Amino acid sequence: MVTEGILETLTVDDLQEQHKAYARIIGIENMVKLSEIFGGSSFYIPKKQELVKNRVFRAISEEYDGTNIRELCMKYDVAESTVYKVVKEQISRGTRKNIPGQMSFADYNI
């Protein structure tokens, strides 16, 4: 194919204006790879907040102890409603971690 030889020597300056910014950021070689895989399709690039969303939710779930909702909101820059949604299942199952030194009803010998 004639374009293969041209692709090997392609530079950012050879690209159309709307593609140059991407190529400057990711490099011409990666731009060609994206073109090979996603060429002709719409391509959505998420905000950084969306990239880390699952990781943040997992951290909130792991760090939640039943008393630290406000701290988690501030630490991860999310609303209280978000923390409640993430830990809702833990609250309903009663599977939150005990606070160090906290006793359970099961600890009492009656």
Image: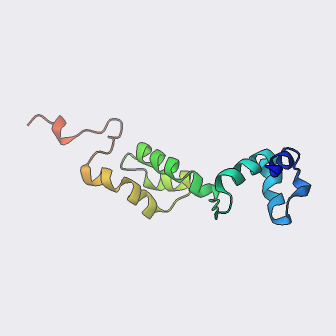
**Nearest to the observer: residue 8 or residue 89:** 8
Q: Is residue 107 found left or right of 88 in the rendered image?
A: left
Taking 102 as reference, is 47 above or below it?
below
Residue extending farthest to the front is 1
Q: Is residue 104 found left or right of 38 in the rendered image?
A: left
**Nearest to the observer: residue 82 or residue 100:** 82
**Nearest to the observer: residue 45 or residue 105:** 45
Question: Residue 45 in the image: x percent, y percent?
Answer: 65, 59
Question: Residue 67 in the image: x percent, y percent?
Answer: 38, 50
Question: Residue 68 in the image: x percent, y percent?
Answer: 43, 50
Look at 26% across and 48% down and name the residue there: 94
Location of the C terminus (image quadrant): top left
Residue extending farthest to the left is 110
Question: Residue 54 in the image: x percent, y percent?
Answer: 49, 50
**Nearest to the observer: residue 85 or residue 43:** 43
Look at 36% across and 36% down and name the residue there: 100
Q: How many circles with numbers are drawn on the protein?
A: 0
Q: In which quarter of the image is residue 98?
A: top left
Colouring chosen for the image of the structure: rainbow
Look at 33% across and 41% down and name the residue there: 97
Look at 89% across and 45% down and name the residue there: 9
